[in-house]
Amino acid sequence: MKKAGEGERHCPICGKPTEESVRPFCSKRCADVDLARWLNGVYAIPAEERVPDTIEDDE
């Protein structure tokens, strides 16, 4: 039974309705496609390159 305000969720890979056993995907195949994308660097979290603070010599 769905809770009030909870709509049907769709697979982020192919758009089909999700299956509880492999949620948020619709099948093991789509879950594997998603994992392969992460492992191959298709998905990436952007980050800013930080320059380390300079260390001053105590003389």
Image (cartoon, grey):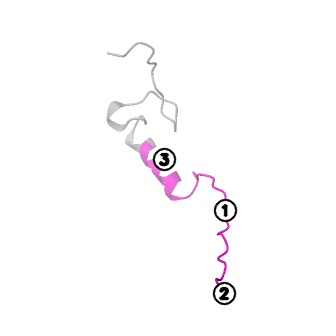
Tag 1 near tag 2, CB within 8 Å: no
Cα gap from disc 2 to disc 3, whole angstroms: 55 Å
Q: Is residue 59 above or below residue 50?
A: below
Give the magenta part as a residue range.
Answer: 31-59
Looking at the picture, how far across and down is residue 28, in whole percent?
38, 42
The amino acid marked with disc number 2 is Glu
The answer to which quarter of the image holds residue 59 is: bottom right
Cα gap from disc 3 to disc 1, whole angstroms: 27 Å
The disc, 3 or 1, on the residue closer to the chain's N-terminal end is 3
Residue on which the image places disc 2: 59
The disc, 2 or 3, on the residue closer to the chain's N-terminal end is 3
**Image point (43%, 48%), residue name:** 32
Looking at the picture, how far across and down is residue 3, in whole percent?
37, 15
Query: Which element carries disc 3, helix, strand or loop?
Result: helix
Q: Indicate whether residue 52 is drawn in magenta.
A: yes
Q: Considering depth in this image, is 28 or 4 the residue closer to the camera?
A: 4
Which quadrant of the rendered structure holds the N terminus? top left
**Is residue 32 toward the left or the right of residue 42 in the image?**
left
The amino acid marked with disc number 1 is Glu
Q: Indicate whether residue 46 is drawn in magenta.
A: yes
Query: Which element carries disc 2, helix, strand or loop?
Result: loop
**Image point (67%, 74%), residue name:** 54
The disc, 1 or 2, on the residue closer to the chain's N-terminal end is 1
Q: Which mark is residue 49?
A: 1
Q: Which mark is residue 34?
A: 3
- The main secondary structure of the magenta stretch is loop
The answer to which quarter of the image holds residue 41 is: bottom right
The amino acid marked with disc number 3 is Asp
**Image point (67%, 78%), residue name:** 56
Q: Considering depth in this image, is 14 or 8 the residue closer to the camera?
A: 8
Count of labels in the image? 3
